[in-house]
Image (spheres, rainbow, N blue to C red):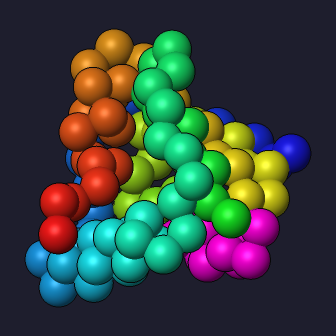
Amino acid sequence: METYRATSGTIVCTLTMDELRDTRSAWQKLFRTALMTREEIPGGIRLVVNDGSAEALRRLIEIERDCCRWITFELDGPIVSMTADGDGASAIRSMWVVDEA
């Protein structure tokens, strides 16, 4: 398991609007094609994708680690837990939601 600890307490995303749109689209594609479970955990959420999508998950987490430094990520193959203190937990839960198609 790889743990990437939050390096900021400020809840902010540093992506441009275009980058945010593209990243959100990539998350939604991953959710539609590979998401097995999404569960709320203390401080945030845990996502589990199918084993074949572990690399796609890793690439998205690399983006998120750079732009959302207030989140702690625990990545274990096809499983990621994303947590934060205080208001960060509810922000995480509202950001990673599967869109109804």
Residue 90 visible to an observer of this rendering: yes
**As drawn, 84 above or below 4:** above
Task: Residue 52: give x, y in percent of width and height.
Answer: 74, 77
Instruction: Judge whether residue 87 is colored magenta.
Output: no
- Looking at the rendering, in which quadrant would you find the N terminus? top right
Q: In the rendered view, does 14 fall on the left or right side of 68?
A: left
Give the residue displayed 51% in from the left and 14% down from the top: 42
**Residue toward you, 73 or 93:** 93
- Which residue of the protein is positioned furthest toward the left in this rendering? 17
x 77%, y 67%: residue:
51
Side of 13 relative to 75 (left or right): left
Task: Specify the quadrant of the image occupied by residue 28.
Answer: bottom left
Of residues 11 and 29, the one nearer the viewer is 29
Q: Residue at x 52, y 21 (%)?
A: 41
Taking the view exactly as shown, the residue that stands out farthest to the right is 1
Please give the range of residues in magenta: 51-61
Height in image: 35 above or below 7?
below
8 up-or-down from 42: above or below: below
| Quadrant in which the C terminus appears | bottom left
Q: Is residue 55 magenta?
A: yes
Which quadrant of the view contains residue 44? top left
Q: Give coordinates of residue 11: x percent, y percent.
A: 27, 37
Task: Out of 33 and 54, give the one closest to the viewer.
Answer: 33
Residue 84 showing in the rendered view? no
Q: Position of residue 21 (x, y in %)?
A: 19, 78
Prevailing secondary structure class for the magenta stretch in the rendered image: helix
In the rendered view, tell whether residue 63 sits above or below residue 94.
Answer: below
Q: Residue at x 46, y 47 (%)?
A: 69
Side of 68 relative to 80 (left or right): left
User: x and y percent of residue 87 in the render?
Assistant: 26, 20
